[in-house]
Image (tube, helix red, strand yellow):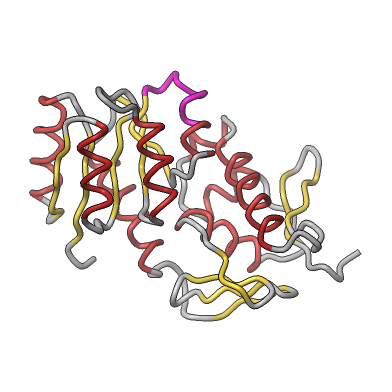
Amino acid sequence: MESMSLLFIEDDARLAQFTIEYLESHGVKVTHAANGELGLREALRVRHDAVLLDLMLPVMDGLTVCRQIRERSDVPILMVTARADEVDRVLGLELGADDYVPKPFSPRELLARVRAAVRRARGLVGPSATLKVGSLILSISSQTATLDGRPLVLTGYEFTILRVLLERRGRVLSREQLLDLAKGSADESFDRSIDVRISRLRQKLREHSPGAPLLIRTVRGMGYMLVSESDP
């Protein structure tokens, strides 16, 4: 990949120093903010390729930072959470985070997740093509989506999941298949992360085109499938 810049919002100085040294040794330019308020200010001041965001922060907590960044930017956001904090992970995903990295984390896995999020945001996943189902159109090369001729604002991970569903229209995909095809973590299949992402996608589709039927259908006990407005 080309060089990339990362904003790391973390108050643990030792963890931050160790992580920054590892990432910078692999070509990532890291800007560090030691509390939520400084991190939010930096995220809105400069466009970074991704934001790595701890949830337990002084001055302003990570969930608030995540929500306020997402209200004004589509930059990929990766949360850093304790493994047991499923509620916080779900809340973060609902507020617009693209991924989460459980503590304690492997620096190698962290780097892989950051690179994957940036690739999705840059449109470097999958072939150059345009996908269309009904009035929903996805441009793979530019990572843009339109519904009823109007732009649909999605995070990088939301776009990838929607692309996977479009490419397999009419087929039921389990949570595990969706995670694998979208290059998520296998661990995520055991919590509500995919359900949260699907819920956010549905909400955006409804808000964008209230009169259209839901395009993402739940198949109880099996998973999800995408259908067009004309499908039975």
Residue shown at the point (52%, 62%) measured from the top left = 153
User: Residue 135's spot in the image, x, y percent?
Assistant: 72, 75
Question: Closest to the observer: 42 or 1?
Answer: 42
Q: Is residue 135 above or below residue 46?
A: below
Instruction: Locate residue 67: give its quadrant.
Output: top left
Residue shown at the point (58%, 45%) measured from the top left = 197
- Image quadrant occupied by the C terminus: bottom right
Residue shown at the point (44%, 18%) measured from the top left = 84
Q: How many marks?
A: 0
Q: Is residue 55 above or below residue 129?
A: above
User: Residue 222's spot in the image, x, y percent?
Assistant: 75, 42
Question: Closest to the observer: 232 or 26?
Answer: 232
User: Residue 21's spot in the image, x, y percent?
Assistant: 8, 41
Instruction: Locate residue 75: give its quadrant.
Output: bottom left
User: Magenta region: which residues?
Assistant: 82-90
Question: Closest to the observer: 210 or 89?
Answer: 210
Q: Residue extending furthest bottom? A: 129
Q: Is residue 5 above or below residue 152?
A: above
From the viewer's perspective, tell me whether residue 225 is left or right of residue 9.
right
From the viewer's perspective, tell me whether residue 32 is left or right of residue 165.
left
From the viewer's perspective, tell me whether residue 26 is left or right of residue 9.
left
Residue shown at the point (72%, 63%) measured from the top left = 209
